[in-house]
Every structure is written in C-alpha cells, then in structure tokens.
Image (cartoon, rainbow, N blue to C red):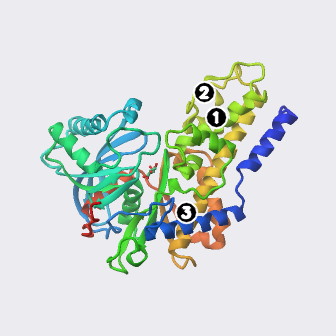
Amino acid sequence: MNKEISPALRDFLASLEQLFFIDQKELEEVIAGFHGEMRSGLAGKKSSLKMIPSFVKRPAGTEKGDFLAVDLGGTNIRVLAVRLDGNRHATLIAAHRFAIPTKLTGGTGARLFDFIAGCIGQFFAQHQIDRQHYHDLAFTFSFPVEQIAVASGRLISWTKGFSVTGVEGRDVAALLREALARNQMGFLNIVALTNDTVGTLAAQSYADPAGDIGVILGTGTNACYPEKGKNIKKLPGLDPAGEIIINIEWGNFNKLKTNIYDRLLDRASNNRQQQQLEKMVSGMYLGELARLIIVRMIKQRLLFTDKKVPEVFQKKYALTAEKMAQIAQGNPSRVGLGPQNASPADVLAIREICRIVTLRAGRLAGGLIAAVIRWMDNDLASSHTVAVDGSLFEKYPGFRDSVTATLQEILGARSSKIRLKTIKDGSGIGAAIVGAVASLNITRRQP
Ligand code: BGC
C-alpha cells in the first residue's frame, strides 16, 4: 500500500481485513451450518431458512403463450410483455422499468399496489400494447412469501427496507388483483406469483435444462433450487421422486460470525435480527457497512483529519453500492471525493474498505452457492448451471471473480463443472414461464 498512508491508518486497515476475512475453514463451517438449517427448514422445524415450496417444478421448454409480467424488486418495478415460443425461446416484446418512489416503501399497501397497477396501465399506453391480447399476468414479488398455491401466497415479512402497512400476512396476489380492479384492469388474470429467484431459475432452465440454481445478488440476496418431493418432509404426500423448486430465502441465514459493524448496522435497521446474511452480502447494505467503518475512522481521526466530512458519509445509507463501485473503479470524484475534500491517503483507504467489505460478501455468496450444489450433488457427478441476476454480481468490479474463486477453493477441480450464467430480466420472463408451467395441483391448508 501507498507510503502516504500513516502507520495508524495502515494498522487499522490491517485489523479490518482480519475482522472481515472468512477463511476456508470458516467457510466450511458456514456450509455445514447452512445444510443443518436447510434440513430443519424442509422438515418444518425451527430454522432461519424458510425453505418455501414454490408449487412449481422446472419448465420443460415446451411452454407457450403471451404473458404480461410485473416484477416488484427492491428498487424498481419492471413491466414486461413476453412471448414463449414453446421451443425453449422467450422473446421480450416490450419492457419498461419504473423506479419505486421511496415514500411508497413506507406507505400503505393500497398506495403501493395502486402504483403497480398504474405502472401496468402506463406500460399498455406507452408501448401500444393491445389490451385485448394480454389476459395472463405473472407477478414476481421479491420478498418472502408463504406460497399457498401457484398464484397466491402471503407475505411473511418485508425485507430490503420496506415497511408498507397492511400487507404482511396478506395474499399479495389478491392485493394486486384488487388494485387492478380499482384501476380498470380487472381483465388481467394473475396466473403466477413468483419469487425472483424462482423466476430466474425458470428463465434459465426454459432455455437450458442444465440450469438448476437461481441466485439473486442485487439489492437483496436469495437462492432457489429443485428439491425432491421425498425430502420436503413438511409437505407430506408429494410424489417422492418429483421435484418442487424451493425458495430458500437465504438472506435470513443466521449461523454466521458477525462483527461490531454488522451489529451496529443491524441495531439501526428496521428489521432487527432478521436477514443476517443479506445484511452482510447484498447491495442494499454493503455501502452502509463501509460507511459505518468510515464514520468510526473519522471519529478516531484516521480519515479527513483537517477536512470537512464529505456528504456521502454523513447520512445513513448515503453510500450506495453503486457509489462504492465508482470508488472501486477509481472514480472517487464522481461520488464527491475530489482532491478538494479528500487526500490521496483518504481515497486509498476508502477504496481498501470497499474492497474488504465486498470481498467478504463475494466469499459468502460463493460459499453458499457451493453449499447448495453440494446439497444437490455432493460428488459433483453432474454439471450445474447457476443462473444469477442482480446488479452487484453483474456490475461491481471483482464481485463475480471472488464468487468464482471461492467456488474453486471449496469445490476444487470439480468446480469446472459449474457455470455461472448472468441472466437479464430473468425474474420477469421466468414468472411468465412459471405461469405457463402446469400447476402441481397441491394446495396448503389455510391456517
Ligand atoms: C427477499 C427475497 C428476494 C431477495 C432478492 C430478499 O430480501 O427476502 O425474497 O428473493 O431479496 O431480491
């Protein structure tokens, strides 16, 4: 590291690196803990992993039809018109992204669902989409939902900073249906309610049967995989050899060693003691973790010693993963860290903090992908395609590399059997595919 860095700063960074580094042995322990939680979750026992049966299996590739898909993620709503040709090919006829206004993430359910309906209305108008042609709507809802059937499910709890009232415990497909009716779009029939991981996996395996894990590494994080009926002990009576895609909800995994910054972040969050893994891995939280470290260093007079603290470190969540990516790419002035307010040593140190925090995230993500692969195929007898969506994986410099390196570290030479495939718009396209996959015709008893 650069000689301009003072010994005190160098020492701090060296101990930070230690604090955040998860070595191979620790990763193996994480994997063992994860398998234990998977097992308990599938048996319906207490577990930080909800292991939610999605009520669908992977598509055959022959599904056909025209669908509208609406995808509520963490920061955007995407509306898509999708055509499935019945021969492993999905075409995006039109797509539109709408940013979710921050005030809606803390408002009432009716306002949020009216906004979603409004986006669909605008989509019809702006893309001259024939309303007569589209009847089937697939809904991707990227939050933990206890699925009741293929097209209905209750929100368990909000994640990713959402705190919309009147939705937890309710059937979100029914809430959308009501909003569509209020907004003169009652002609749309909701045929699927899907988690984004399940959509991503469905999109990949529609095109390529080797696809067997769906992973999101974006604002939030999660994964899904196909499980044999016989292993889903909490859902008796399934075809033992048949498969159901399980939404792991891995963001809530909590058998992890946390440090002082993780605990500070958790304490100030609106979902305390939940989503422990997500708070260490996903794009929503990485910037805040880095900011908390920087704030502490400023207090210890290690950074910005004779300068005003830049705005990006002053407010909670002001340092986003996008801004960290700019710093990592060597463009600190784009985020307000120019020569006038940051010394070269400040910039170097902040870049190092971003690297340390993101490296842990990439290693955890890689370790848990390895965990899911081992769960499905311990000897790696087959090849596996992991469909990955999310801006962190796609855009953050070096993130994909640390996931890949960790897979190699854990699985050795056999990791060559694993392909990580970035998939764009998979969650929306995949929801349309889920809409076309015949429902497994199982329903859960209403409590
Ligand atoms: C949600 C998951 C979702 C993930 C990625 C998490 O916060 O709980 O349902 O799949 O974010 O969007």
Residue shown at 77% from the left, 19% from the top? 306
Q: Which mark is residue 369?
A: 3
When asked about the image quadrant of residue 207, the answer is: bottom left
Nearer mark to the viewer, of 1 and 3: 1
Earlier in the chain: of badge 2 and badge 1, it is 1
Earlier in the chain: of badge 1 and badge 3, it is 1
Q: Is there a contact, CB below 8 Å, between mark 2 and mark 1?
A: yes
The count of marks equals 3
- State the quadrant of the N terminus: top right
Q: Nearer the viewer, residue 428 or 104?
A: 104
Q: Which residue is mark 2?
A: 312
Nearer mark to the viewer, of 2 and 1: 1
Regarding residue 1, the answer to whether it shows in the image is no
The answer for how far apart the CA atoms under marks 2 and 1 are is 8 Å
216 above or below 117?
below
Residue shown at 40% from the left, 53% from the top? 144
Secondary structure at numbered mark 3: helix
Q: How far across and down, in percent of the image, does residue 175 sit? A: 25, 45
The answer for how far apart the CA atoms under marks 1 and 3 are is 27 Å
The local crowd at label 2, few if under 14, some if 14 to 19, many if 20 or more residues have their Cα within 10 Å, is some
The three-letter amino acid code for the residue at tag 3 is Ile
Residue shown at 31% from the left, 70% from the top? 60
420 above or below 15?
below
When asked about the image quadrant of residue 429, the answer is: bottom left
The answer for how far apart the CA atoms under marks 3 and 2 are is 33 Å
- State the quadrant of the C terminus: bottom left
Q: Which residue is mark 1?
A: 291
Q: Is residue 314 left or right of residue 202?
A: right
Q: How far across and down, in percent of the image, does residue 169 sit? A: 33, 49
261 above or below 243?
above
When asked about the image quadrant of residue 100, the answer is: top left
The three-letter amino acid code for the residue at tag 1 is Arg
